Image (cartoon, grey):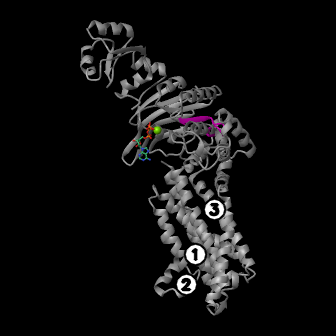
Amino acid sequence: MTATEMRPDAAHALIAARAPRRWGAWYVAEHRFRGMKAYTQTVIATGIGSPLMYLFAMGVGLASLVDANVEQNGLAVSYLVFVAPALLAMAAFEAAAEEFSYPIMLGFKWNPIFTGMGASPVTPGQIIDGQVIAVTVRIAVTSGLYYLFMLLFGAVPGEFGWVSLGSAVLTGLAFGTLLMAYVATLENDSGQIAMVMRFLVLPLTLFSGTVFPLTQLPWFLQWIGWLSPLWHGTELGRVVSYGHPEPAWLSIVHVAYLLLLTVVGWMLARRVAARRLNR
Amino acid sequence: MPEPVIEARNLVKKYKDFAAVDDISFDVAPGESFGLLGPNGAGKSTTMRMVGAVSSRTAGSLSILGLDPDEYGPEIRSQLGVVPQADNLDEELRARENLLVYGRYFGLPRRLVAQRADELMAFAQLDDKVKAKVDDLSGGMKRRLTIARALINDPRILLLDEPTTGLDPQARHVLWDRLFRLKEQGTTLVLTTHYMDEAEQLCDRIVVVDEGRIMAEGSPSQLIRQYSSREVLEVRFGSQNNEVVARELEGIGDRNEVLPDRILIYASNGEEALGAVTERGHTPITSLVRRSSLEDVFLRLTGRSLIE
Ligand SMILES: Nc1ncnc2c1ncn2[C@@H]1O[C@H](COP(=O)(O)OP(=O)(O)OP(=O)(O)O)[C@@H](O)[C@H]1O
Ligand SMILES: [Mg+2]
């Protein structure tokens, strides 16, 4: 159909939907930002408090215990330098776990604002995209603050350390979009989200080669790291932060793996949302 | 005849094997106000969701403003205002903010949205609640805010799924007045309701739906004329006696209907019918003659009372 052979009200509709077709995801993100305003203080407070605490505890407190430097693949660095990229990725990972879980359940079920958005020109896919945009910004802010403190603590020797910001955000998205897809399938939350937090998020933060090298784990547990986006993100952060020696192909694998999870999770979430909002 | 803004042909919606909407056809003309009337589970909301281009149909054809919702969802939705049966305002935002974010979904400039939000807060008589958290509004206020939200894009067609359920009588009348004004401005209204008086007040044309099918269609007065009598006599003999007495009243009026608490006698003249009842030696505990309403049409068509 072309506009000329179309009735006027249909032609009018075609024009009216142009902006939402193109920008719908950004409108959704705008909405989500407004919702986040309510807890900006919390975001900022944890964004400042948590790096201060962790860097101090790990870098100053624990480092004095660990005493010796951490050696991986023949490069020895101070414990603080070793752990800082991991802490950065962990913060992004945890923020993503928060933002892609309960708020998603909220929008589909408890206060079904996604249903409300669905009645507007915005599509279910754009509703998901909007969440991704808003949460990406939110994680970037958290990570940015973290990175500032890492600089202050002298935890980033390399000149390309800032790239670890990107790997941290990507770590959050790789896990978060998958989590969002899963949460979107839940008709009811009878504790599943809490289970994910306790039995997936928490163990992953500890056993992804974060606070100690993955090689310290018994061999039969090391696969946790290989599957964990947090391990890939952390190792990547170490490469750019202090030149952690690893073969180039492995760095490429890190990036590819994180991108793959992000894309798969994102697409799955879009599909689940489309099905769920079409009732 | 102008082209219809909504055209549904043999519309079907199935959930697994269950047909919630089962072969429904209707047209809605521009500027018309059209009502779907039916008991719980009749398929009204399901029909509204399909018309609202959020729920895809299982079979049949549907065209809104000449466009197929399967293909032109965003286009169609850009021209609709939707008041869903269950409010889905953002409880975490303030009242006016809900209008602001919603207006943006239509791609409207911020300034225009802000201006309309102010007008609509007044329209919904929520001026003093602009800064209130939605969570803190009463049920009726939330309803009014939802209606205001549905108008933020100045819609061609307004879909209202039980708009006044939960409103107090005064708020209902205010809302009717507002809807009437929109109608005068040429907005097409499609609404579902359980309230007969609402349908009679607002709708030019009604379809009575039951179990996913259309039972009857027409203007309120047409339906009343066709399926009921001019007047209705309601008599009560006590709930144990109604059944027995009703049998002895056969023949008075066009027909009668026994409800648990009363007998309805359909007659063109209620007072005469009452005379005939007493002539047969029955004195009701209470009696009432009233004009026939859509409630009676509904009872006749489905054998069930509309408000359960
Ligand atoms: N998502 C769904 N999955 C399965 N069945 C559904 C779904 N939505 C509605 N139904 C069924 O379809 C039928 C019609 O539901 P609908 O909500 O359209 O009724 P309604 O006329 O709006 O009723 P009410 O007056 O109670 O709002 C009901 O039997 C309902 O259980
Ligand atoms: Mg309904």
* Residue B137, quarter of the rendered image: top right
The mark found on residue A230 in the picture is: 1
Mark 3 sits on what residue?
A135
Q: Is mark 2 within 8 Å of ligand 1?
A: no
Q: Residues within 10 Å of mark 3 (few under 14, many from 20)?
A: many
In the rendered image, residue B54, in percent from the top left (x then y), is placed at: 53, 46
- B308 left or right of B116 in image: left
Residue identifier under label 2: A214
Q: Give the answer, above or below, for where A275 lies relative to B41.
A: below
Mark 2 or 1, nearer chain start? 2
Residue in the foreground of this view, choosing between A116 and A259:
A116
Mark 1, chain letter?
A: A
Name the spot of residue A262 as percent of width and height, x first: 58, 68
* Displayed quadrant of residue A68: bottom right
Q: Chain of mark 2?
A: A
Span of residues in magenta: B149-160
Q: Quadrant of residue B13?
A: top left
- Decide if residue B154 is in sight here: yes
Chain holding disc 3: A
Disc 1 on helix, strand or loop?
Answer: helix
Residue B72 visible (yes or no): no
Is A180 drawn above or below residue B185 in the view shown? below
Name the residue type under label 2. Answer: Leu
Q: Secondary structure at mark 3?
A: helix
